[in-house]
Amino acid sequence: MSINSLNLNTFEKEISSAKQPVICFFWTAYCSACNQMSVAISNLERRLGDSAKFCTINLEEYPKISDHAGVIVVPTVIIYKNGRAVTRIFGLTGEEELGYTIEEMIVA
């Protein structure tokens, strides 16, 4: 698997059509916490990518998505299931904690 980079045209389609949980990582290039957390996201995608779909959204390029998704702080991870947001994680979060939350959503 790989991490998909979403834009305005693909955001809704990817979330609504997914058969598995969708982990969306909202970030900006100027955010040092986002840069740190992107390593954790990449590691988790390698480990859990068969059970969940991992996506990134650069909010500098697509600010309208942040409005639509209700993202007010970066980094933010939103986990979607069946087209709906079920969990939101705000701010810098460690790989272990983030992985635990994602794994819970996969089995739920």
Image (cartoon, grey):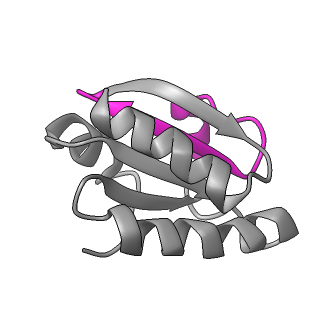
Which percent across, then down, holds residue 106?
32, 39
| Number of marks drawn | 0
User: Which residue is at a point 71% across and 64% down the rendered structure image?
Assistant: 28
Which percent across, then down, holds residue 82?
23, 27
User: Which residue is at a point 79% across and 53% down the rendered structure image?
Assistant: 92
Q: Is residue 73 left or right of residue 88?
A: right
Q: Is 45 contained in the magenta span?
A: no
Quarter of image, res 80: top left
Which percent across, then down, holds residue 51?
24, 54
User: Which residue is at a point 43% across and 48% down the rendered structure image?
Assistant: 23
Q: Is 76 contained in the magenta span?
A: yes
In which quadrant is the C terminus drawn?
top left
As drawn, 59 above or below 12 = below
In which quadrant is the N terminus drawn?
bottom left
User: Which residue is at a point 53% across and 39% down the rendered structure image?
Assistant: 101
Q: Is residue 49 left or right of residue 98?
A: left
Visible in this render: residue 31?
A: no
As drawn, 19 above or below 6 = above
Visible in this render: residue 75?
A: yes
Q: Nearer the viewer, residue 74 or 2?
A: 2
As drawn, 78 above or below 45 = above
Q: Which residues are magenta?
A: 63-83
Q: Nearer the viewer, residue 67 or 28?
A: 28
Q: Is residue 46 left or right of residue 15?
A: right
Which percent across, then down, holds residue 67?
60, 33
Quarter of image, res 76: top right
Q: Nearer the viewer, residue 63 or 11?
A: 11
